[in-house]
Image (cartoon, helix red, strand yellow):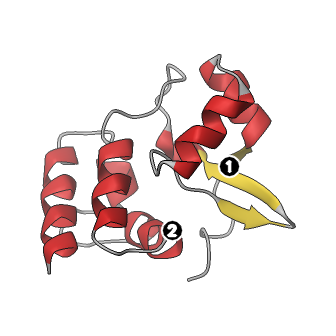
Amino acid sequence: MTGLPAGERVFNVPETAELLGVLVTRIMDDLNSHRLVAVQVDGVRQIPARFFTDAGEINRFVPGLIALLADGGYSDEEILEFLFTEDGSLPGRPVDALHGHLAREVMRRAQAMAIA
């Protein structure tokens, strides 16, 4: 898988800034510090909509999970692949589980992957 699954909803950096009510530079800082990751589509950074809550905030588990995997040597593409690949043992995708009662299980798995 390269990037995100087809049809996955994304926001560009200005749209993300508007959603969160912050300056574009804040989103760039979040990307550079691995609080968020993005894919490049035609030279434009795209951030998955599933990283955000319905209330327009960054899901509280997303920055920690991204940082954990990045510190463990995972590339942005590998992080996105982990998050957006179906996992029958959850069930579903880890990114979707971050929005429910299985979020801590996803964090535990990411921590185990990062140390392995």
The residue that mark 2 highlights is: 76
Please give the label number shown on residue 62.
none
- Residue 4 shows in this picture: yes
In the rendered structure, the answer to whether residue 54 lies left or right of residue 93 reads: right
Q: Secondary structure at mark 1?
A: strand
> What's the CA distance linking mark 2 and mark 1?
15 Å
Amino acid bearing label 1 = Val
The quarter of the image holding the N terminus is: bottom right
Q: Is residue 20 above or below residue 47?
A: above
Nearest to N terminus: mark 2 or mark 1? 1
Q: Who's the residue at 32% across and 59% down the image? A: 94
The quarter of the image holding the C terminus is: bottom left
- Circle 2 or circle 1, nearest the eye: 2
Which quadrant of the structure image shows residue 68?
A: bottom left
Can you give x and y, in whole percent of width and height, for residue 41 in the image?
79, 65
Can you give x and y, in whole percent of width and height, for residue 63 in the image?
38, 43
Can you give x and y, in whole percent of width and height, for residue 9 in the image?
66, 50
Q: Who's the residue at 63% across and 36% down the image? A: 27
Q: Is residue 7 above or below residue 25?
A: below
Can you give x and y, in whole percent of width and height, for residue 106 in the image?
21, 57
Residue toward you, 1 or 27:
27
In the rendered structure, the answer to whether residue 17 lies left or right of residue 83 reads: right
- Residue 7 shows in this picture: no
Q: Secondary structure at mark 2?
A: helix
Residue toward you, 93 or 67:
67
Amino acid bearing label 2 = Asp
Please give the label number shown on residue 10.
1
Q: Who's the residue at 60% across and 22% down the image? A: 20
Residue toward you, 80 or 92:
80
Q: Is residue 61 above or below residue 66?
A: above
Residue toward you, 6 or 83:
83
Seen as rendered, the residue at the extreme right is 42
